[in-house]
Image: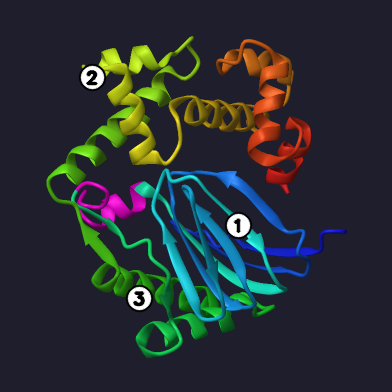
């Protein structure tokens, strides 16, 4: 089945990314991926399946879900649909909350309804302005204003506090992500991570799975793939073969297989897709 998909990227110069997409085919699948931004999906029409970590959730009209940073997730269209997507960078939210986001609290990741109340009015206004052909100053200001208003509502009503063990896990997760970001290009092994944090190998493995929803090997592979793609997009004078080795893959074939596993596409097709 041919994929028919319309994605409108509103690059409006904001400190966040907001856009909508309309999928016209059940073939529309966004493969498992992660990023440092908080992602919020608002289903205006239709149905989509969202898989967060190992849990499948169906979102229908007037439902939304918040996906916290560094969480593996994927989506699949179940019907023709229309979805608004808001991506809030980690640094943006940390600065806005005086460093408390992902240190003392995170967003509630359960499915919620926006069919009534304050949030419904805000989404309707965003829907109207995002789809306007003429993006004049007034429209852009309205999008910015309503996104901030939406964020104010979400921070007030859709967050959960970290306590006890959760705080320790979040601290580990943040330190682990930082460690991988510095060492991904080396011949890194689970034993190295365990030694870094002073834990046993078995406990480190369980903790990574618990915090990130995937294994150490899977997470490291994803980081290397993302780094390789970013490196090529920003400097395509260097061959993918050389870049693959630079980011830690022993061979180009390993890079190719990892990209196929994550995106279901070859490296070059993946790069073409993300560069559009």
Residue 88 is situated, as x and y percent measured from the top left of the image, at 42, 56
Label 3 neighbourhood size at 10 Å, few (<14), some (14-19), many (20+)? some
Q: Is residue 275 left or right of residue 127?
A: right
Nearest to N terminus: mark 1 or mark 2:
1
Question: Which quarter of the picture shows residue 133?
Answer: bottom right
Residue 101 included in the magenta stretch of the image: yes
Q: Is residue 259 left or right of residue 27?
A: left
Label 1 neighbourhood size at 10 Å, few (<14), some (14-19), many (20+)? some
Q: For residue 75, which numbered disc appears in the image?
A: 1
Mark 1 residue element: strand
Indicate the quadrant containing the N terminus: top left, top right, bottom left or bottom right. bottom right
Residue at which label 2 appears: 199
Nearest to N terminus: mark 3 or mark 1:
1
How many angstroms separate mark 3 from mark 1 (CA)? 26 Å
Mark 3 residue element: helix
Nearest to N terminus: mark 3 or mark 2:
3
How many angstroms separate mark 1 from mark 2 (CA)? 34 Å
Q: Residue at x 56, y 80 (%)?
A: 61
Label 2 neighbourhood size at 10 Å, few (<14), some (14-19), many (20+)? some
Question: Which quarter of the picture shows residue 260?
Answer: top right
Q: Is residue 19 left or right of residue 196?
A: right
Q: Residue at x 26, y 73 (%)?
A: 157
Q: For residue 149, which numbered disc appears in the image?
A: 3
Residue 236 is situated, as x and y percent measured from the top left of the image, at 72, 26
How many angstroms separate mark 3 from mark 2 (CA)? 43 Å
Q: Is residue 223 visible?
A: yes
Q: Are marks 1 and 2 in contact (CB under 8 Å)?
A: no
Q: Is residue 238 visible?
A: no
* Highlighted range, magenta: 91-103
């Amino acid at each position: 089945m041919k994929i028919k998909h319309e994605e409108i990227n509103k690059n409006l110069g904001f400190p966040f990314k907001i856009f909508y997409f309309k999928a016209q085919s059940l073939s529309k699948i966004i493969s498992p991926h992660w990023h440092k931004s908080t992602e919020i999906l608002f289903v205006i029409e239709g149905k989509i399946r969202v898989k967060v970590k190992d849990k499948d959730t169906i979102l229908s009209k007037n439902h939304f879900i918040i996906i916290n940073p560094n969480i593996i997730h994927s989506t699949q269209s179940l019907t023709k649909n229309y979805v608004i997507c808001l991506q809030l960078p980690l640094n943006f939210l940390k600065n806005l909350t005086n460093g408390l986001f992902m240190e003392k609290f995170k967003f509630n990741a359960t499915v919620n309804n926006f069919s009534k109340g304050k949030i419904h009015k805000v989404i309707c206004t965003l829907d109207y302005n995002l789809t306007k052909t003429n993006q004049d100053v007034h429209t852009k200001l309205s999008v910015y204003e309503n996104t901030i208003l939406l964020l104010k509502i979400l921070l007030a009503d859709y967050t959960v506090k970290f306590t006890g063990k959760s705080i320790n896990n979040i601290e580990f997760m943040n330190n682990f992500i930082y460690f991988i970001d510095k060492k991904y290009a080396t011949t890194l092994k689970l034993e190295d991570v365990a030694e870094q944090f002073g834990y046993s190998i078995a406990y480190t493995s369980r903790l990574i799975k618990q915090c990130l929803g995937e294994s150490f090997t899977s997470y490291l592979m994803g980081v290397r793939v993302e780094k390789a793609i970013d490196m090529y997009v920003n400097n395509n004078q260097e061959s993918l073969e050389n870049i693959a080795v630079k980011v830690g893959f022993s061979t180009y074939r390993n890079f190719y297989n990892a990209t196929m596993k994550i995106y279901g596409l070859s490296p070059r097709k993946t790069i073409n897709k993300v560069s559009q």
